[in-house]
Amino acid sequence: MHHPPAWAGDLAGLGAGSGDTVILIDGALRHADPVPHGEILRLLASGVAVAGVASFGAVRAAELDCYGMTGAGVVYAGLCNGTIIDDEAVDDTVSPGPPAGTAIRPALARAVALGVVTPAEARLLRAAAAGLDGRHATWQDIARAARPQLRPAVTRMQGWHKRRAFISLARQQDARDALARAAAGTLPAPPRPLVPPPAGHASAVPAPAPSGPGTLLPASLRPWQLSDPGFPERWRRFVLHRAGAAAAAEVDAARLRCGQIGYWLTPGEAGFLDPQEMAARILVRSVAADAAAPVWPVTAVGAITLTGGRPAPGLRSAVRGPGDLSALWDVRDPAPEALTAAARDRGFGSAQDAFRAAQGRQAV
């Protein structure tokens, strides 16, 4: 039986029981609440085989395969090995064919949001495309109509569009293959869960068990979180990608009270950062205080991203108190707010939480 893209609650309403198979292909993201992880975990716990393919289903499978969800197809494999990211798997704003006039504007808007082109380049590319026959315009046509200095931007857009078109076609093929294999009874068997579902699995998002109070990341990432100089930047990119640029935009720093801004930002940051950067930092620093933050769960692929592919670093010296973290992280501002901000930039809730994590590392 086929159903439209799933919203939160739709899988639970199927009435599936032990021995049944549910295939999740696509799901609502922008106009309704997406299917939460807990809803899939409840099906798995009741003996229902759940497979995810193609688009949103492949994303959920990559996140929950360690709990017994089945993943299959090109997109799922790409998510697991890191060659495809979540945004690419679910993005339907780019059509597979040449960029028709009606599709150029949303494609450029999406490319700007992802940093493929700058806003200024996008405006000039739209202007160059305006005089062309939108029904048949290609990026080569736009390149010929654009100024010579825009050729690099056109090349980036062409490569990005070609990649999105490939993924879009792969999603379609994955969905057809999954439905055909389900009908033939040849879908991959559900994997043996590597991690038992959380007790009660009632929360929207399953989370790896943290090793101490106030910590967000699993203990396996603690060496990089504590000691790697490049970790804060990787953590920031990870959070902003998972939460989405729109989430940062919704944090309107101009509407926050001084006490609220002062809780998340140092006095120097509050006085000199622009509102957009203030919002991004507040978002990154606040996720450790939210057990249902949209960065959960940290999958194997996400963990590799956060390590930067580097070997686990060791502590350079003993950490006898929160103050020793200042030397470890090269925090030169003696104000306690600066050390707190540095800890939050590494995914800790506070400097004290980071100190407890460091004590755990030293005891190992």
Image (tube, helix red, strand yellow):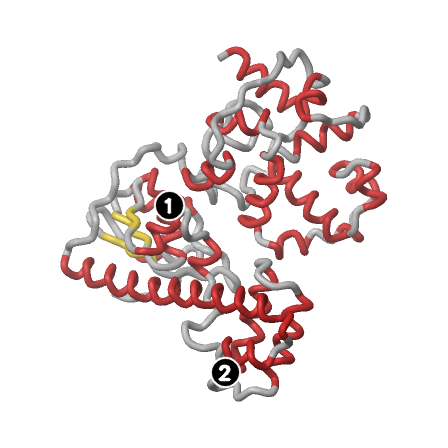
- What crowding class fits label 2: few (fewer than 14 Cα within 10 Å), some (14-19), or many (20 or more)? some
Q: Is mark 1 on a helix, strand or loop?
A: helix
The residue drawn where x is 48% and y is 56% is 87
Quadrant housing the N terminus: bottom left
The residue to which callout 1 is attached is 81
- What crowding class fits label 1: few (fewer than 14 Cα within 10 Å), some (14-19), or many (20 or more)? few
Which of the 4 quarters of the picture holds residue 147? bottom right
Relative to residue 170, is residue 195 depicted above or below? Answer: above
Residue 56 position within the rendered picture, expressed as x and y whole percent measured from the top left: 40, 57
Q: Image check: 149 left or right of 20?
A: right
The residue drawn where x is 55% and y is 37% is 291
The residue to which callout 2 is attached is 137
For the view shown, which residue lies furthest in the left direction?
184
Q: Which of marks 2 and 1 is in front?
A: 2
Q: What element carries label 2?
A: loop
Relative to residue 319, is residue 55 depicted above or below? Answer: below
Query: Could you tell me how far apart the alpha carbons at marks 2 and 1 are, in whole angstroms?
Result: 35 Å
Three-letter residue code for mark 1:
Asn
Residue 238 position within the rendered picture, expressed as x and y whole percent measured from the top left: 55, 44
Q: Earlier in the sequence, mark 2 or mark 1?
A: 1
Q: Between residue 248 and residue 224, name the one nearer to us.
A: 224
Residue 20 position within the rendered picture, expressed as x and y whole percent measured from the top left: 22, 52
Residue 70 position within the rendered picture, expressed as x and y whole percent measured from the top left: 28, 47
Q: Image check: 103 left or right of 75?
A: right
Residues marked 2 and 1 touching at CB (< 8 Å): no
Three-letter residue code for mark 2:
Ala
